[in-house]
Amino acid sequence: MLVTLVAILRNGQLCLEKIVTSSEQSGITMAACQVNAQIGIADWLANGPYREWKLEGYKCVLGKYIPKHDA
């Protein structure tokens, strides 16, 4: 079963959804996503291009997820 971890980010008026990882990339399960999502997102934010963005929320989604342009 495919699981996708999605971060919802804000920078001023701009809001984005970005895929952090999926079970295809990292082998996460739904249970692991729900328990460890905050740790994974913190690491992803610290080491990626969205360091200046504020995390508004996140979600663990079953299946393939296509981010919305405006969350």
Image: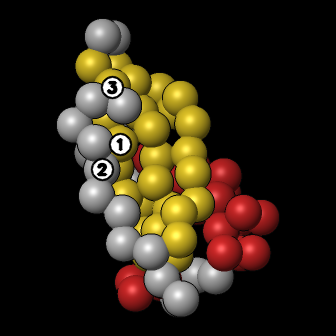
Marks 1 and 2 close (CB-CB < 8 Å)? yes
Q: Residue furthest top?
A: 13
**From this viewpoint, is residue 35 visible?**
yes
Q: Is residue 53 left or right of residue 5?
A: left
Q: For the residue labelled by badge 2, is the local secondary structure a helix, a strand or a loop?
A: loop
Q: CA distance from mark 1 to mark 2?
A: 5 Å
Please name whichever residue, 59 or 63, is drawn nearer the observer in this view of the structure. 63
Which residue lies under the disc numbered 2? 67
Query: In the rendering, which numbered label is found on residue 38?
Result: none
| Residue 56 x/y as whole percent | 53, 29
Picture residue at 75% right of the left edge, 75% below the top:
31
Q: CA distance from mark 2 to mark 3?
A: 11 Å
Which of the 4 image quarters holds residue 25?
Answer: bottom left
Position of the C terminus, as image quadrant, is top left
Q: CA distance from mark 1 to mark 3?
A: 7 Å
Q: For the residue labelled by badge 3, is the local secondary structure a helix, a strand or a loop?
A: strand
**From this viewpoint, is residue 53 visible?**
no
| Residue 24 x/y as whole percent | 40, 87
Please name whichever residue, 24 or 68, is drawn nearer the observer in this view of the structure. 68
Picture residue at 36% right of the left edge, 63% below the top:
65
Q: Is residue 39 left or right of residue 67?
A: right
Please name whichever residue, 44 or 70, is drawn nearer the observer in this view of the structure. 70
Query: In the rendering, which numbered label is found on residue 17?
Result: 1
Q: Residue furthest left?
A: 69
Which residue lies under the disc numbered 3? 15
Relative height, residue 14 to residue 27 (above, below): above
User: Disc 2 vs disc 3: which is toward the camera?
Assistant: 2
Picture residue at 45% right of the left edge, 38% below the top:
8
Please name whichever residue, 62 or 47, is drawn nearer the observer in this view of the structure. 62
Relative height, residue 53 to residue 19 (above, below): above
Amino acid type for the residue under numbered disc 1: Glu
